[in-house]
Amino acid sequence: MFLYSLPAFGGQTPTGNTITIGTPQGSVIMKNFYKTAAIVSPGSGALIVDNPAYDISYYTGDSSFIISLKQPLTMPTRAAASEAFIQVLGISEQDACKLKVILGVPISVDPHYAGRDLGLSFCGIPTR
């Protein structure tokens, strides 16, 4: 079970330079990704990165990040998406592994890996 403290955005889009998300392993301070997001939905989240290889989204409901691969799973694609995640947030691999992140592939892209949490490439095997 994951217990994450929700950022106190109150339905508002954060305007500061950083955002702090609390996790069971400690708080993670990151760049305010809302400032550079492709799409912002106040009160519900943001599409942080939208490119041909993957999307990176944030959901305020449970302070989770979803990385969706748009190409069949390969180690380079998974690694590139994982690296982009830490770069856009300005955090370390160690802090990234504290966050609730689901990295997956839709069934339309790769039926074999669809529905699985593949995890960030540098965090080891996901436990959820």
Image (cartoon, rainbow, N blue to C red):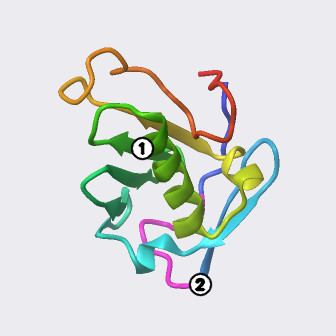
Q: Secondary structure at mark 1?
A: helix
Per the image, label 2 sits on a secondary structure element best described as loop
Whether residue 46 appears in magenta in the rendering, the answer is no
Front-most of residues 25 and 71:
71
User: 49 above or below 117?
Assistant: below
Near mark 2 (Cα within 10 A), the count class, few <14, some 14-19 or many ≥20, is: few
Residue drawn 59% across the image and 84% down it: 17
Task: Return the x and y of residue 114 as percentages of the image width and height.
Answer: 33, 21
16 left or right of 12 in image:
right
Horizontal side of residue 108 vs 127, given as left or right: left
Q: Amino acid at mark 1?
A: Thr
Q: Quadrant of the C terminus?
A: top right
Q: At 50% from the left edge and 76% from the top edge, which residue is drawn?
A: 14
> Which amino acid type is shown beneath numbered disc 2?
Asn
- Toward the viewer: 10 or 119? 119
Q: Which mark is residue 60?
A: none
Q: What residue is shown at x 29% (from left), y 60% (from top)?
A: 50
State the image coordinates of residue 46 (x, y, percent, origin top left).
Answer: 36, 61
Residue nearer the viewer, 39 or 122: 122
- Return the residue found at the far left: 108
Residue 93: where, in percent of width, then height? 71, 53
Q: Vertically, is 94 above or below 84?
A: above
Q: Quadrant of residue 1?
A: top right
- State the CA–CA distance, disc 1 to disc 2: 29 Å
Residue range of the region highlighted in magenta in the rendering: 7-16
Residue highlighted by disc 2: 17
Q: Crowding near pointer 1: few (<14 within 10 Å), some, many (20+)?
A: some
What residue lies at 54% left-to-right and 75% top-to-bottom? 32
